[in-house]
Image (cartoon, rainbow, N blue to C red):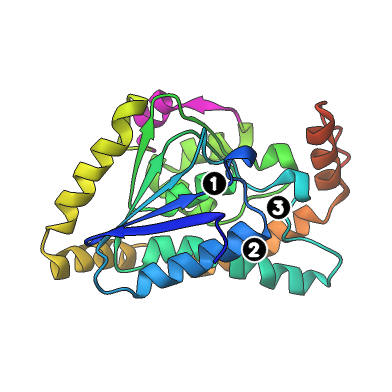
Protein backbone atom coordinates (compact mmCIF):
# COMPACT_ATOMS: atom_id res chain seq x y z
CA UNK A 1 0.00 0.00 0.00
CA UNK A 2 1.25 3.50 -0.89
CA UNK A 3 2.47 5.75 1.92
CA UNK A 4 0.31 8.65 0.65
CA UNK A 5 -2.26 7.55 3.25
CA UNK A 6 -1.20 6.18 6.63
CA UNK A 7 -3.39 3.82 8.64
CA UNK A 8 -3.00 2.67 12.22
CA UNK A 9 -5.22 1.17 14.87
CA UNK A 10 -5.28 1.35 18.65
CA UNK A 11 -7.94 -0.86 20.11
CA UNK A 12 -11.30 0.14 18.62
CA UNK A 13 -9.93 3.41 17.16
CA UNK A 14 -8.44 3.71 13.67
CA UNK A 15 -6.50 6.77 12.54
CA UNK A 16 -6.25 7.57 8.83
CA UNK A 17 -3.70 10.25 7.93
CA UNK A 18 -3.26 11.85 4.52
CA UNK A 19 0.47 11.96 3.89
CA UNK A 20 1.46 14.32 1.09
CA UNK A 21 2.58 17.17 3.37
CA UNK A 22 4.75 18.85 0.73
CA UNK A 23 1.65 19.11 -1.50
CA UNK A 24 -0.80 20.09 1.27
CA UNK A 25 -2.24 16.57 1.11
CA UNK A 26 -3.90 17.33 -2.22
CA UNK A 27 -5.57 14.49 -4.11
CA UNK A 28 -3.66 12.79 -6.89
CA UNK A 29 -4.38 9.37 -8.40
CA UNK A 30 -2.15 7.57 -5.89
CA UNK A 31 -3.67 9.22 -2.82
CA UNK A 32 -7.23 8.66 -4.06
CA UNK A 33 -6.65 4.98 -4.83
CA UNK A 34 -4.94 4.41 -1.49
CA UNK A 35 -7.63 6.29 0.45
CA UNK A 36 -10.30 4.15 -1.20
CA UNK A 37 -8.45 0.97 -0.19
CA UNK A 38 -7.97 2.20 3.38
CA UNK A 39 -11.59 3.25 3.85
CA UNK A 40 -12.85 -0.04 2.40
CA UNK A 41 -10.58 -1.87 4.82
CA UNK A 42 -11.59 0.09 7.91
CA UNK A 43 -15.27 -0.14 7.00
CA UNK A 44 -15.02 -3.94 6.98
CA UNK A 45 -13.12 -4.36 10.26
CA UNK A 46 -15.60 -5.29 12.98
CA UNK A 47 -13.20 -4.39 15.79
CA UNK A 48 -13.06 -0.73 14.71
CA UNK A 49 -15.77 1.56 16.10
CA UNK A 50 -14.30 5.03 15.54
CA UNK A 51 -12.25 6.46 12.67
CA UNK A 52 -10.16 9.62 13.11
CA UNK A 53 -9.34 11.22 9.75
CA UNK A 54 -6.60 13.86 9.59
CA UNK A 55 -3.66 15.18 7.56
CA UNK A 56 0.09 15.30 8.01
CA UNK A 57 1.78 18.71 8.06
CA UNK A 58 0.09 22.08 7.64
CA UNK A 59 -2.97 20.87 5.76
CA UNK A 60 -5.89 18.54 6.26
CA UNK A 61 -6.51 18.36 2.49
CA UNK A 62 -6.37 21.31 0.11
CA UNK A 63 -8.46 19.53 -2.54
CA UNK A 64 -7.41 18.31 -5.97
CA UNK A 65 -3.79 18.51 -7.07
CA UNK A 66 -4.02 21.36 -9.60
CA UNK A 67 -0.38 20.81 -10.51
CA UNK A 68 -1.46 17.45 -11.89
CA UNK A 69 -4.38 18.91 -13.87
CA UNK A 70 -7.65 20.59 -12.98
CA UNK A 71 -9.12 17.30 -11.83
CA UNK A 72 -6.24 16.29 -9.60
CA UNK A 73 -5.19 13.54 -12.00
CA UNK A 74 -8.72 12.19 -12.52
CA UNK A 75 -9.35 13.78 -15.92
CA UNK A 76 -7.62 12.87 -19.19
CA UNK A 77 -8.45 12.31 -22.85
CA UNK A 78 -10.79 9.35 -22.35
CA UNK A 79 -14.46 9.62 -23.37
CA UNK A 80 -16.48 11.82 -21.01
CA UNK A 81 -18.59 8.93 -19.71
CA UNK A 82 -15.47 7.00 -18.68
CA UNK A 83 -14.11 10.04 -16.88
CA UNK A 84 -17.39 10.52 -15.02
CA UNK A 85 -17.32 6.88 -13.95
CA UNK A 86 -13.69 7.23 -12.82
CA UNK A 87 -14.50 10.27 -10.70
CA UNK A 88 -17.53 8.55 -9.24
CA UNK A 89 -15.38 5.61 -8.16
CA UNK A 90 -12.97 8.01 -6.44
CA UNK A 91 -15.92 9.74 -4.76
CA UNK A 92 -16.85 6.46 -3.08
CA UNK A 93 -14.38 7.57 -0.41
CA UNK A 94 -16.91 10.19 0.71
CA UNK A 95 -19.69 7.63 0.64
CA UNK A 96 -17.68 5.31 2.85
CA UNK A 97 -16.98 8.09 5.37
CA UNK A 98 -20.67 8.95 5.44
CA UNK A 99 -22.18 5.47 5.42
CA UNK A 100 -19.71 3.05 7.04
CA UNK A 101 -21.02 1.68 10.37
CA UNK A 102 -18.34 3.55 12.35
CA UNK A 103 -18.27 7.06 13.78
CA UNK A 104 -16.01 9.13 11.52
CA UNK A 105 -14.26 12.20 12.95
CA UNK A 106 -12.47 14.80 10.84
CA UNK A 107 -9.50 16.26 12.73
CA UNK A 108 -8.95 19.36 10.59
CA UNK A 109 -5.37 20.27 11.42
CA UNK A 110 -4.83 22.88 8.69
CA UNK A 111 -5.93 23.98 5.22
CA UNK A 112 -9.23 22.37 4.22
CA UNK A 113 -10.48 23.24 0.75
CA UNK A 114 -12.34 21.94 -2.27
CA UNK A 115 -12.76 18.18 -2.25
CA UNK A 116 -10.86 18.12 1.05
CA UNK A 117 -13.69 20.13 2.60
CA UNK A 118 -16.15 17.69 0.99
CA UNK A 119 -14.30 14.83 2.70
CA UNK A 120 -14.52 16.62 6.05
CA UNK A 121 -18.23 17.27 5.55
CA UNK A 122 -18.83 13.57 4.86
CA UNK A 123 -17.62 12.74 8.37
CA UNK A 124 -19.98 12.48 11.33
CA UNK A 125 -18.08 14.99 13.48
CA UNK A 126 -15.60 17.75 12.67
CA UNK A 127 -13.12 19.52 14.94
CA UNK A 128 -10.55 22.08 13.77
CA UNK A 129 -7.27 23.58 14.88
CA UNK A 130 -7.58 27.34 15.39
CA UNK A 131 -5.05 27.96 12.61
CA UNK A 132 -7.06 25.99 10.03
CA UNK A 133 -8.37 27.82 6.98
CA UNK A 134 -11.34 26.75 4.86
CA UNK A 135 -12.56 27.39 1.31
CA UNK A 136 -14.98 25.58 -0.98
CA UNK A 137 -12.59 26.65 -3.80
CA UNK A 138 -14.39 24.92 -6.68
CA UNK A 139 -15.62 28.04 -8.45
CA UNK A 140 -12.10 29.47 -8.46
CA UNK A 141 -11.02 26.33 -10.34
CA UNK A 142 -13.86 26.62 -12.85
CA UNK A 143 -15.60 23.46 -11.68
CA UNK A 144 -18.90 22.76 -9.94
CA UNK A 145 -17.79 20.59 -7.01
CA UNK A 146 -17.42 16.92 -6.20
CA UNK A 147 -16.98 14.40 -3.35
CA UNK A 148 -20.42 15.20 -1.95
CA UNK A 149 -20.00 18.74 -0.66
CA UNK A 150 -23.12 20.18 -2.29
CA UNK A 151 -25.18 17.52 -0.51
CA UNK A 152 -23.51 17.52 2.91
CA UNK A 153 -22.70 21.21 3.46
CA UNK A 154 -26.33 22.49 3.28
CA UNK A 155 -27.29 19.86 5.85
CA UNK A 156 -24.55 21.11 8.18
CA UNK A 157 -24.69 24.92 7.86
CA UNK A 158 -28.05 25.42 6.12
CA UNK A 159 -28.80 25.88 2.41
CA UNK A 160 -28.41 29.66 2.28
CA UNK A 161 -24.97 29.68 3.94
CA UNK A 162 -23.82 26.71 1.88
CA UNK A 163 -24.73 28.50 -1.35
CA UNK A 164 -22.84 31.59 -0.22
CA UNK A 165 -19.75 29.53 0.60
CA UNK A 166 -19.83 27.83 -2.80
CA UNK A 167 -20.78 30.84 -4.90
CA UNK A 168 -18.46 33.43 -3.33
CA UNK A 169 -15.67 30.90 -2.72
CA UNK A 170 -14.02 33.00 -0.03
CA UNK A 171 -11.56 31.76 2.56
CA UNK A 172 -12.79 31.57 6.15
CA UNK A 173 -11.25 30.73 9.50
CA UNK A 174 -11.72 27.94 12.01
CA UNK A 175 -13.51 30.42 14.25
CA UNK A 176 -15.91 31.20 11.39
CA UNK A 177 -16.38 27.47 10.85
CA UNK A 178 -17.31 27.01 14.50
CA UNK A 179 -19.69 29.99 14.42
CA UNK A 180 -21.67 28.62 11.44
CA UNK A 181 -21.68 25.08 12.81
CA UNK A 182 -19.37 23.56 10.23
CA UNK A 183 -17.11 22.29 13.00
CA UNK A 184 -18.20 21.32 16.49
CA UNK A 185 -15.30 23.17 18.05
CA UNK A 186 -12.14 25.09 17.11
CA UNK A 187 -9.28 24.31 19.49
CA UNK A 188 -5.72 25.56 20.00
CA UNK A 189 -3.50 23.68 17.57
CA UNK A 190 -1.67 21.70 20.23
CA UNK A 191 -4.94 20.65 21.88
CA UNK A 192 -6.70 19.32 18.75
CA UNK A 193 -5.45 15.75 18.63
CA UNK A 194 -5.52 15.13 22.42
CA UNK A 195 -9.11 16.40 22.52
CA UNK A 196 -10.14 14.23 19.57
CA UNK A 197 -8.43 11.27 21.16
CA UNK A 198 -10.57 11.85 24.26
CA UNK A 199 -13.75 12.01 22.13
CA UNK A 200 -12.77 8.90 20.16
CA UNK A 201 -12.06 6.91 23.31
CA UNK A 202 -15.40 7.92 24.80
CA UNK A 203 -17.23 6.87 21.64
CA UNK A 204 -15.28 3.61 21.40
CA UNK A 205 -16.55 2.64 24.85
CA UNK A 206 -20.19 3.47 24.07
CA UNK A 207 -22.78 0.79 23.35
CA UNK A 208 -21.64 -0.29 19.86
CA UNK A 209 -24.96 -1.51 18.47
CA UNK A 210 -26.80 1.59 19.66
CA UNK A 211 -24.10 3.90 18.27
CA UNK A 212 -24.18 2.14 14.90
CA UNK A 213 -27.97 2.42 14.73
CA UNK A 214 -27.94 6.08 15.75
CA UNK A 215 -25.74 6.76 12.72
CA UNK A 216 -28.02 4.62 10.54
CA UNK A 217 -31.06 6.57 11.75
CA UNK A 218 -29.47 9.88 10.78
CA UNK A 219 -28.43 8.55 7.39
CA UNK A 220 -31.88 7.11 6.71
CA UNK A 221 -33.52 10.45 7.53
CA UNK A 222 -31.69 12.21 4.69
CA UNK A 223 -33.20 12.46 1.22
CA UNK A 224 -32.23 12.28 -1.58
CA UNK A 225 -29.82 9.49 -0.94
CA UNK A 226 -26.16 10.54 -0.76
CA UNK A 227 -25.21 8.06 -3.48
CA UNK A 228 -27.64 9.71 -5.91
CA UNK A 229 -26.18 13.14 -5.20
CA UNK A 230 -22.67 11.78 -5.82
CA UNK A 231 -23.78 10.47 -9.23
CA UNK A 232 -25.00 13.93 -10.23
CA UNK A 233 -21.93 15.70 -8.85
CA UNK A 234 -19.56 13.39 -10.73
CA UNK A 235 -21.33 14.10 -14.03
CA UNK A 236 -21.44 17.88 -13.64
CA UNK A 237 -17.96 18.25 -12.16
CA UNK A 238 -16.38 16.19 -14.94
CA UNK A 239 -18.12 18.19 -17.65
CA UNK A 240 -16.93 21.43 -16.02
CA UNK A 241 -13.38 20.11 -15.71
CA UNK A 242 -13.24 19.48 -19.47
CA UNK A 243 -14.02 23.11 -20.35
CA UNK A 244 -11.61 25.85 -21.43
CA UNK A 245 -12.48 27.72 -18.23
CA UNK A 246 -11.16 24.87 -16.07
CA UNK A 247 -7.95 24.72 -18.10
CA UNK A 248 -7.58 28.50 -17.69
CA UNK A 249 -8.15 28.21 -13.92
CA UNK A 250 -5.40 25.61 -13.56
CA UNK A 251 -3.00 27.66 -15.72
CA UNK A 252 -3.72 30.82 -13.73
CA UNK A 253 -3.12 28.95 -10.48
CA UNK A 254 0.29 27.70 -11.64
CA UNK A 255 1.21 31.12 -13.06
CA UNK A 256 0.00 32.96 -9.93
CA UNK A 257 -2.36 35.29 -11.78
CA UNK A 258 -6.08 35.98 -11.95
CA UNK A 259 -7.95 33.69 -14.38
CA UNK A 260 -9.90 35.07 -17.30
CA UNK A 261 -13.07 33.01 -17.78
CA UNK A 262 -14.86 32.97 -21.14
CA UNK A 263 -17.77 30.64 -20.42
CA UNK A 264 -16.63 27.83 -22.66
Give the number of callouts.
Answer: 3
Residue that carries the numbered disc 2 in the rendered image: 234
Front residue of 180 and 35: 35
Q: CA distance from mark 1 to mark 3?
A: 12 Å
For the residues carrying marks 2 and 1, which lies nearer the camera in this image?
A: 1
Q: Residues within 10 Å of mark 3 (few under 14, many from 20)?
A: some
Give whichever of discs 2 and 3 has the lower sequence position. 3
Looking at the picture, how far across and down is residue 89, in whole percent? 60, 70
Tag 2: Cα neighbours inside 10 Å, few (<14), some, or many (≥20)?
many
Any part of residue 224 in sight: no
Q: Which mark is residue 61?
A: none
User: Magenta span covers which residues?
Assistant: 170-182
Q: Which residue is mark 1?
A: 116
Task: Indicate which disc, 1 or 3, sits on the residue closer to the N terminus.
Answer: 3
Along the viewing direction, whichever of 106 and 238 lies nearer the viewer = 106
Graded by Cα atoms within 10 Å as few (under 14), some (14 to 19) or many (20 or more), the crowding at tag 1 reads: many
Is residue 181 on the magenta stretch?
A: yes
Q: CA distance from mark 2 to mark 1?
A: 15 Å
Left or right: residue 61 versus residue 179 is right
* Rendered image quadrant of residue 42: bottom left
Earlier residue among tags 2 and 1: 1
Q: Which residue is mark 3?
A: 72
Amino acid sequence: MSDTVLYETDGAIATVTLNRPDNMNTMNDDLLATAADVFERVASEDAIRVVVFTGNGRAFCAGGDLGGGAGGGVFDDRPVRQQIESLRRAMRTSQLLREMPKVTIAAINGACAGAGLSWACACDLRYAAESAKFNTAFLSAGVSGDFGGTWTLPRIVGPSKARELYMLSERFTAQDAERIGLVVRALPDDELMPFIRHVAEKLSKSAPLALRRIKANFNDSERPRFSEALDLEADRHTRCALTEDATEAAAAFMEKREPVFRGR
